[in-house]
């Protein structure tokens, strides 16, 4: 009955995640920036990364190394600064939807109908949120709020990815 039940099964079956142990997924735990880009990278088939890390806090040998390099090289993220990615920082809902939107090629929303009072037209994530709503990837945290600065949970991110993979249009991962 959990909203993330089918998405978790899909994520495990498709190699997007193995969970936090062999028997747990931890759906309410915060999802780190490293986990989010790793989930995205795996969901699109693990494309080749750029050759070098632009980030001083992302070094070889980490499970997320190739995913972060791919995300940076594909302009899915620019990091938290020119030289840092902040892999262990919790990812916000705005960041997650923006990463996903960029992964899908930054498709333009077909409408300017913004149901959320906490998403302004000047926000960097505005088009990403409108696109995600149109595609059925998110409905927000309430009918009128998206909660862009709230931490994205592991259950939410796999649900976003699952819904993106099952959208009517075939421009999603």
Image: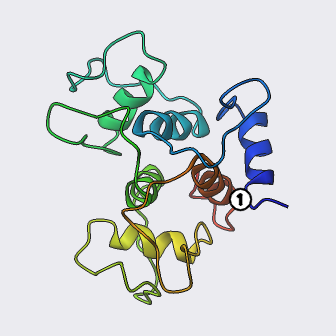
Q: Nearer the viewer, residue 136 or 173?
A: 136
Numbered-mark total? 1
* 7 is higher (above) or lower (below) than 109: above
Q: Nearer the viewer, residue 168 or 143?
A: 143
In the image, farthest residue toward the top: 61
Q: The N terminus lies in which quarter of the figure?
A: bottom right
* 27 is higher (above) or lower (below) than 129: above
Q: Nearer the viewer, residue 72 or 116?
A: 116
In the image, farthest residue toward the right: 1
Instruction: Identify the residue shown where x is 39% and y is 66%.
Output: 148
In the image, farthest residue toward the left: 82
* 146 is higher (above) or lower (below) than 36: below
User: What is the quadrant of residue 21 in the picture?
Assistant: top right
Number of other residues with Cα within 10 Å of mark 1, as a class: few under 14, some 14 to 19, many 20 or more:
some
Task: Give percent across and percent down for residue 25.
Answer: 70, 37
From the image, tell me which residue sits under label 1.
166
Task: Give percent across and percent down for residue 10.
Answer: 77, 44
Instruction: Identify the residue shown where x is 40% and y is 39%.
Output: 33
* 82 is higher (above) or lower (below) than 22: below
Task: Give percent across and percent down for residue 171.
Answer: 56, 58
Query: Would residue 1 be found to the left or right of residue 148 on screen?
Result: right
Indicate the secondary structure of the residue bearing disc 1: loop
Query: Would residue 128 be found to the left or right of residue 4 on screen?
Result: left
Task: Give percent across and percent down for residue 26.
Answer: 66, 40
User: What is the quadrant of residue 160 in the picture?
Assistant: bottom right
Instruction: Identify the residue shown where x is 62% and y is 72%.
Output: 136
According to the image, what is the colour scheme of the structure?
Answer: rainbow
Instruction: Identify the residue shown where x is 33% and y is 66%.
Output: 125
């Amino acid at each position: 009955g959990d909203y993330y039940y089918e998405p978790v099964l899909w994520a495990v079956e498709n190699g997007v995640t193995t969970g936090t142990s062999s028997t747990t997924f931890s759906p309410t735990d915060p999802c780190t920036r490293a986990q989010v880009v790793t989930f995205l990278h795996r969901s699109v088939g693990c494309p080749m990364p750029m050759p070098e890390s632009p980030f001083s806090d992302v070094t070889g040998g980490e499970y997320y190394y190739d995913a972060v390099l791919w995300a940076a090289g594909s302009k899915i993220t620019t990091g938290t600064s020119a030289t840092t990615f902040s892999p262990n920082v919790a990812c916000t809902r705005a960041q997650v939807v923006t990463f996903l939107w960029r992964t899908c090629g930054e498709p333009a929303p077909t409408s300017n109908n913004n149901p959320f009072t906490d998403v302004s037209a000047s926000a960097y994530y505005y088009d990403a949120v409108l696109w995600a709503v149109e595609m059925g990837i998110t409905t927000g945290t309430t009918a009128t709020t998206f909660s862009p600065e709230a931490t994205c949970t592991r259950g939410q991110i796999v649900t976003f990815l699952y819904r993106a993979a099952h959208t009517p249009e075939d421009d999603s991962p």
